[in-house]
Amino acid sequence: MAGEKTTRAAAVHAQIREEIFQGVLSPGRRLRLVELSQRFEVSQSVVREALTRLSEQGLVAAAPQQGFSVIALSLQHLDELTEARTRIESMVLRLSIERGDIRWESAAVAAHHHLVNTPTTLPNGFLSGEWFAVHEQFHQSLLDGCGNDRLLAVAMSLRDAATIYRRWSRPVGNDYGRDVAHEHQQLLDAAVARDADTAADLLVRHIDRTSASLRTVIQGETVTPARVHQETARQ
């Protein structure tokens, strides 16, 4: 019985998590136990377990007497995280370019090839979770040659913390006109050419572009639900 409840909670968790990432459940939206339990045809305790786990992952806020809600967009948090990422990731990328050997270079080229050949959208127009996973593998491959596991761990933890912002840049930030494939190609080309200055500058702009669309939303105090969009995804 306990195992069955855990399985149901995991399924509810996965569905709500994906709807948060896709912007269907928009920033700040209240998540009511009664409504969700009826929708998923499970008990409120199952929903509460799923929401508690999402809260632990930083995707849902839990407040006494107020229940659960999707985390809100925070300009201070976004700006602090963006500054930390641009400084740390660009430094680690510089080290990779300086220290990376042919195996690092080959791995980055292979990761980019995998990214280019992974569909960005699902049949319903939403961004593909698989694409985001491969996208992360590509960015990690660029940093893997730094030769310092501690710095790499810090950089990757900051990337993990920014996952929600990457996922929201298109459905919440409405950043549909971005040529992300070109940005990735430029990054790879600069890294393989061992042009650290260009690569670091490109990475800073790549990171900040994601944040810029969400800054506009925060400052305008308008958050719209995700649109089903059939064009090629831009992240």
Image (cartoon, grey):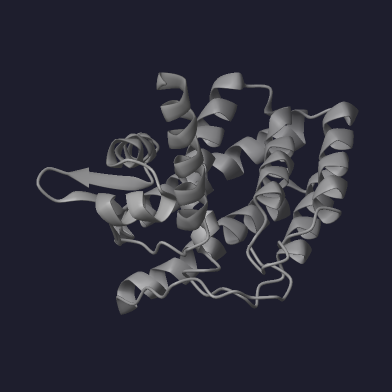
**Camera-side residue: 29 or 116?**
29
Residue 75 in the figure: left or right of residue 117: left
Which residue is painted at 43% across and 67% down in the image?
A: 214
Locate the N terminus by quadrant: top left
Rendered position, 109 above or below 186: above
| Percent position of residue 41, x then y | 41, 48
Which residue is painted at 30% across and 62% down in the image?
A: 29
**Residue 193 appears in the figure:** no
Rendered position, 25 above or below 41: below
To which quarter of the image does residue 84 belong? top left
**Residue 46 appears in the figure:** yes
**Camera-side residue: 20 or 166?**
20
Which residue is painted at 71% across and 30% down in the image?
A: 144
| Percent position of residue 5, x then y | 42, 29
Locate the C terminus by quadrant: bottom right
| Percent position of residue 161, x then y | 45, 42
Rendered position, 169 above or below 217: above
Which residue is painted at 38% across and 43% down in the image?
A: 42
> Total of numbered circles in the picture?
0
**Camera-side residue: 47 or 162?**
47
To which quarter of the image does residue 155 belong? top right
**Camera-side residue: 119 or 65?**
65
Residue 114 in the figure: left or right of residue 92: right
